[in-house]
Amino acid sequence: MARTDVIVLGAGIVGASAALHLVKRGLAVTLVERAVPGEGTSFGNAGIIEGNTFFPYPF
């Protein structure tokens, strides 16, 4: 059986990004999506991706 440290629900931009950063930190991540990954909208961003007003920060 595969090891899982973290389960991320939703493979939209937020879930996929969180999963990627967790994997880069050495955690075993299971990413769960009920539909096609990347085709839904994330609740927190209201479906809008705005790159000009957001400044990323490290986890």
Image (spheres, helix red, strand yellow):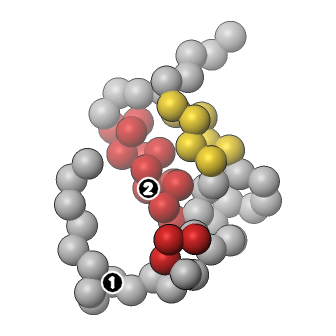
Viewport quadrant of the N terminus: top right
The residues tagged by marks 2 and 1 sit, at their Cα atoms, a distance apart of 15 Å
Q: Disc 2 designates what residue?
A: 17
Residue at 50% in and 71% down: 44
Q: Position of residue 51 (x, y in %)?
A: 33, 83
Query: How busy is the neighbourhood of tag 2: few (under 14 within 10 Å), some, or many (20 plus)?
Result: few
Q: Quadrant of residue 37?
A: bottom right
Q: Amino acid at mark 2?
A: Ser
Q: Are marks 2 and 1 in contact (CB under 8 Å)?
A: no
Q: Image height check: is 23 above or below 53?
A: above
In this rendering, would 12 be left or right of 20?
right
Q: Secondary structure at mark 1?
A: loop
Q: Image height check: is 46 above or below 44?
A: below
Q: Secondary structure at mark 2?
A: helix
Query: How busy is the neighbourhood of tag 1: few (under 14 within 10 Å), some, or many (20 plus)?
Result: few
Name the disc covering residue 2, or none.
Answer: none
In this rendering, would 47 be left or right of 45?
right
Q: Amino acid at mark 1?
A: Gly
Residue at 47% in and 45% down: 19
Q: Position of residue 2 (x, y in %)?
A: 63, 16
Q: Position of residue 5 (x, y in %)?
A: 49, 24
Q: Position of residue 57 (x, y in %)?
A: 20, 60
Q: Image height check: is 22 above or below 33?
A: above
Residue at 57% in and 70% down: 42
Name the disc covering residue 51, or none.
Answer: 1
Looking at the image, which residue sits at the far right? 35
Q: Image height check: is 36 above or below 29?
A: below
Residue at 51% in and 54% down: 16
> Of marks 2 and 1, which one's residue comes earlier in the chain?
2
Q: How many marks?
A: 2
